[in-house]
Each structure stands twice: as C-alpha cells, then as structure tokens.
Image (cartoon, rainbow, N blue to C red):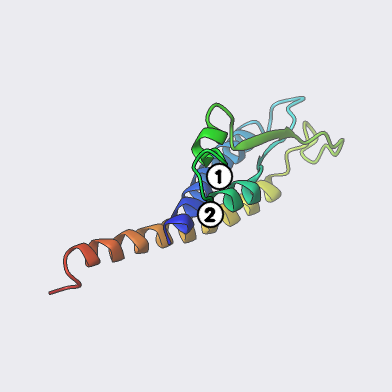
Amino acid sequence: MASSVKLLSNLLDYCTEKNRVIAKNISNLATEGYQRQDVIFKDVLNESSSSLMKVSNSKHITSMQEQTEGTSKFEYVNDNSEDMVSGINNVNIEREMSELAENTLRFKFASKRVGDYYRSMQNVIRGGGR
C-alpha cells in the first residue's frame, strides 16, 4: 500500500503542476502570439515499476529518489498548432476549462485516497478503535 501512496503523491504533484499550466494558458488568452502550453508526466511507468522491484542487493539498482534527483518529473511542451481559436493565439478556453475540470476530479480522487490511507494508519496506531 505504501507504494500506491507514493504513486498517488506523484499524481498529486502532477495535478498541481497541470493546474498551474492551465491557469497560465487561461491568463494569456488575450496575449497576442502566446502559444498554449501543456505538461506531461514523463516516465511514470518506469519510475513506478522500478520502485516496486525487489533486489537482492541495494547496490544493484539505484533508488527512485536518486534517479529522479535533479531532474524534473514533468515535461513542458508548447502547442505549436496554427489554429487561432481565439483570433489572437491558439488557446481554446473551452478546452482549458474542460481540462481544468478533469484535473480537479483527478486531484480530488488522489487526495481522498491518500487521506483514507493515513486515516487507516492512524486507526491502526490507536489500536483499531479500542
């Protein structure tokens, strides 16, 4: 279960960063020449699978923290499409708002699951409600 909490923590980090990028896109809706940006959660599967591996010696595989230290988990990309949806740039407010709603739901799900995990751990520590 602790590994799934780490994955959910990574998802919360992604949702936070995605929200910042969406807010930046919305705030630049009327900025001439602005290119819409997006954030990609790179190497999620690789990081997740390496964190779940069992090794016989700690020297065989570096820890996930050592692998990701100094590197960003996220990749930022510019949307180079030529569609001038707003007439000024390629930011589509309907798309941004739907991505914001989706991202909010994803964040609420992950935060609820993490909260549930820590509440159950707290219950165990207290002796199961005795």
Q: Position of residue 117 (x, y in %)?
A: 36, 62
Q: Which amino acid type is shown beneath numbered disc 2? A: Lys
Q: Is residue 68 above or below residue 105?
A: above
Q: Is residue 105 above or below residue 90?
A: below
Q: Residue at x 58, y 51 (%)?
A: 48
Cα gap from disc 1 to disc 2, whole angstroms: 26 Å
Quickly name the residue at label 2: 54
Q: Earlier in the sequence, mark 1 or mark 2?
A: 1
Q: Secondary structure at mark 2?
A: loop
Give the quadrant of residue 82. Answer: top right
Question: Of discs 1 and 2, which sits in the foreground?
Answer: 2
Point out the residue furthest to the bottom here. Answer: 130
Q: Is residue 32 above or below residue 100?
A: above
Quickly name the residue at label 1: 14
Q: Which amino acid type is shown beneath numbered disc 1? A: Tyr
Q: Residue at x 57, y 41 (%)?
A: 60
Q: Position of residue 92 (x, y in %)?
A: 73, 44
Point out the residue furthest to the left here. Answer: 130
Q: Secondary structure at mark 1?
A: helix
Give the quadrant of residue 90. Answer: top right
Would you call the spot at circle 2 few (<14 residues within 10 Å), some (14-19), or many (20 or more)?
few
